[in-house]
Amino acid sequence: MPERTDCLIHLRAEGVSVIIDCTAGRLPAIAYWGGDLGALSAADVTAVVASGATPGPIADQGVPTGPALLPEHWTTWTGRPGLSGSRAGTAWSPKFTSSSVAVTGDVADDGVITDGVIIGGRAVVEVRAADPVAELELSITIELTAGGLLRSRAEVINTGAESYQLNDLVLAYPVPERARELLDFAGRWAKERTPQRRELIVGTHLREGRRGRTGADAATVLHAGVPGFGFADGELWAVHTAWSGNHTHYAERLATGEQVLGGGELLLPGEVRLASGESYTSPWLYGSHGVGLDQVARRFHRYLRSRDRHPAADRPVTLNVWEAVYFDHDADRLIDLAERAARLGVERYVLDDGWFGSRRDDKSGLGDWTVSPDVWPDGLHPLINRVRELGMEFGLWFEPEMINLDSDVARAHPEWVMATGDRLPVEHRQQQVINLGIPECYAYLRDAISAILDEYPIGYLKWDHNRDLIDSGTSPEGRPGVHAQTDAVYRLIDELKAAHPGLEIESCSSGGARVDLGILERTDRVWVSDCIDPLERQQMNRWTTQLVPPELMGSHIASGRSHTTGRRHDLSFRAGTAVFGHLGIEWDLAEATEAELTELGGWIEFYKAERELLLRGDLVRVDFADESVYAHGVVAPDRRRAIFAVAAVGRSEVSAIGRIPLRGLDPELRYRIEPVLIDPAAAGRGRDPWFADDLPAIPGTALIGAGLRISDLRPEHVALIRLTAV
């Protein structure tokens, strides 16, 4: 449609309305973001915007009364500015004037503009602006996507002759004053995505990620909602910064009562200096609105599932051999594991760390990406050929962004090790970071990985990243290099996937330390955590799905004794936890008993039969007063089928679990309820009676409102329930 310079825009999609104010040549501002306002007329849209304006002397002077999407200091906004930088101390407070507004996508009336108002559905808004005095140009993109997800990003261009140092660029979405409670996440290695809440008070709640990667302690999704919100109830607004390097999320409340949620990349000093004509583009800032945390999460899920390259629901059952063999690579033993896995129905076999260079432990070899002739004298061909003969896809572990100082590549190119000034960063896990921002280093890594992919039929890479980027600069001057490193990682993955169509890549980073939508634009799943103890995974899987749908979430059946915690659990708890994600196995199958193998085969058979529902159903998590119980499930889009899990994650002060409300069902249907029984002994009636036998079909209204009582569930056990409409 024709470009405009003065208009209001109302976009609607899947229960969400966004009104964008692009009037008076100012930067775009979100005048409304929330539940669907319906099919408003142009006059209605104008009235909605007018009803939210703040009258007074500032407004009388034509100064905006609320923050733009990129907040500006000159408007008297005293919160965090959207753009921070200077040209040697000047041009530090720009005043941008919009020069054009263009809308593409689903626009009503064939793009006809009525009284300066554009009405649309899912659409993209592009606003261009400039400040000729500061010699800066700006382009802001705003999009309402599938799922009703709002996202935006900005590009700043230096049009002056002198360089411009960019210190910060963040975008911000306004949220109403009733949103006074915050929820985001913390965590650590093997305990990722631990929820934390606090009140939103005057000031700034700032979450900075300075690890050079997303981080196990990342905010992940920052929510602001009405106090007391839960999975089903309470209006919420949430943001996510889609960037895998240093980043920020923040919530800010001014003394005037105005509130915003925002985020962007965190730039290190001097990291981005724009020469004349150069530009910087911020990462996408995603926004999700909903009633209840489940609706906020489902908007992310539906957006991701709408992508053309999103994985299909028939995700292959995976065996990863790390916890079976560690660095002890023996071809006969590994082939034996492959044969055992194939008999169980495993569809993908992944060889982990230890296959290359001098890598017999974690002290050497990182960076030397050639197959070790000491361990594999005939290369990987004998193993891969056997894996493929057995009908499985072969996957391989890499850690391309890291380097051991005890490696051929480090000895040949010490300048490729990221460092600041005349010192190396503090060593972690016996390794340092290799600098992909150096063109020659980037080319070496690309070519080395490509050579392996060209020689062997590999369908999957487990892409690991096992340390933070601390003191990460470029030798010899030591200028910070995290931004360039993150850009280079994205480019490297893009190049490899373009050259090898069909290749899948998993983002693993000390477990779940790189889980964000920036990396998921390029990869096909994330590793939730190095801890696959099912008791810990109940919490971590529960909250990882606030951003990531189950099919993108690596979820493996652990060994009987957990590698990270030392706990022991029944196979039913380990498997019943893992099937609500992209299922895999992390277990030395040679140590399993025949009874365990039989039961494991049953779980794999169940997963294959139900993965369309498990990996495409709508997420439901149940609010339950007893914190020793977690309940969650997936409901088919037509609501005729569902699978719920009730897990005892602790010991309750009462002897029986109460009624669990099974939300998401169709109140107009009746459902047959049956337990999911995998263990052959349990199928013969040797199980705990979670609920009464031979229940009649129950109305959906009753299951939603009254719920289903679960009893006699022992601590650290799970009951799976299948519901089918009749």
Image (cartoon, rainbow, N blue to C red):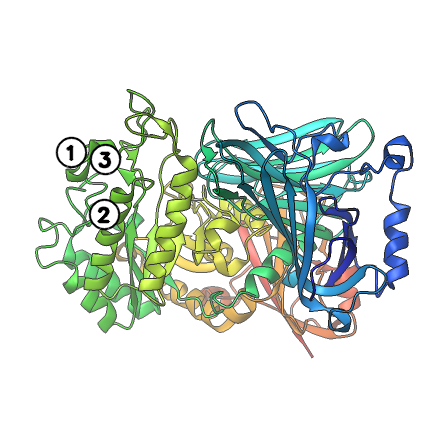
> Can the viewer see residue 519?
yes
Residue wearing tag 1: 411
Residue wearing tag 3: 404
Q: Earlier in the sequence, mark 3 or mark 1?
A: 3
Nearer to me, 477 or 353: 477
Residue 194 location (% of width, % of height): 57, 38
Nearer to me, 526 or 576: 526
Residue shown at the point (50%, 33%) measured from the top left? 267
Residue 351 location (% of width, % of height): 26, 55
Q: Residues within 10 Å of mark 2 (few under 14, many from 20)?
A: some
Q: Name the quarter where the N terminus is drawn.
A: bottom right
Residue shown at the point (64%, 58%) measured from the top left? 298
> Can the viewer see residue 558?
no
Q: Residues within 10 Å of mark 1 (few under 14, many from 20)?
A: few
Q: Label 1: state its secondary structure.
A: helix
Q: Quote the CA–CA distance across marks 3 and 1.
A: 10 Å
Q: Quote the CA–CA distance across marks 3 and 2.
A: 16 Å
In the image, residue 511 sits, relative to residue 599, either above or below, namely above
Residue shown at the point (81%, 36%) measured from the top left? 63
Point out the frontmost of discs 1 and 2. Answer: 2
> In the shown orientation, is residue 393 left or right of residue 377?
right
Q: Earlier in the sequence, mark 1 or mark 2?
A: 1
Nearer to me, 718 or 149: 149
Query: What is the three-letter code of the residue carrying label 2?
Result: Tyr
